[in-house]
Image (spheres, rainbow, N blue to C red):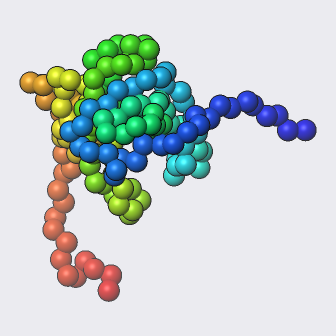
Amino acid sequence: MAIHKKTSQVSGAWAKAAELVSGSKAKIVSEVTTQPSSFTDPKTGAIKPQEVAKGRFQGVEDTLNVSLNRATINALIDAFGEDDSAWQGQALTVETEKVRVAGKAVTALYLIPVGYHKEDDANGYAQIVKDGEKAADVDIPVIQEEAPITENDLPF
């Protein structure tokens, strides 16, 4: 006997970050739902969840599904609170960035509240912070240097 759980999937067309114009305006027009993504956790093999909402984008006629990354979600929480119903209808700015994921060139999408900007923290992770503030600098541990490796140390 197998046990099955009911799941819900968001239907409709998806926003393609590569086709959106960086600097254009957007807004979220639905609640955010958690659903399985197409990515797996490399350590456990479990399917990673993704946070999905419906969005409207300047210059695009249809409402599109959009997967919200952690930087965007953290900024929305900071700007509008934890209740995602408060995120709906807020003016957001689209920012796209070409990145590599598992060796493949993709375009990341960030939705940035008015009065916020995206920057990298000390570890190189994208953070969306209030204008005039800096991304939280996380202390990077100092690795004690050992004696330099010489040619005689190499096994070949």
Along the line of sight, the residue nearer the viewer: 119 or 108: 108
For the residue pair 2 and 106, the one nearer the viewer reads as 106
Quarter of the picture containing the C terminus is bottom left
Question: Residue lying farthest right?
Answer: 1
- Foreground pick, 44 / 91: 91
The image quarter in which residue 139 lies: top left
Q: Residue at x 35, y 47 (%)?
A: 17
* In the foreground, 124 or 143: 124
Q: Can you say whether 66 is above or below 78 in the image?
A: below
Residue 155 location in percent, x, y? Answer: 33, 81
Residue positioned most to the bottom: 156
The residue most toward the left is 132
Q: Is residue 83 above or below residue 129?
A: above
In which quarter of the view is residue 129 placed?
Answer: top left
| Quarter of the picture holding the N terminus | top right
In the rendered image, residue 146, in percent from the top left (x then y), is placed at 18, 60
Where is residue 96, by image quadrant?
top left
Up the image or down, 21 lies above or below 76; here it is: below
Query: Does residue 67 appear left or right of residue 109 in this picture?
Result: right
Give residue 105's position: percent from left, percent from top.
35, 60
Residue at 19% across, 51% down: 144
Question: Residue at (55%, 48%) from the top-left corner?
Answer: 38
Above or below, comparing residue 68 to residue 38 in the picture: above
Residue 79, given in percent of the width and then of the height, sits at: 27, 17
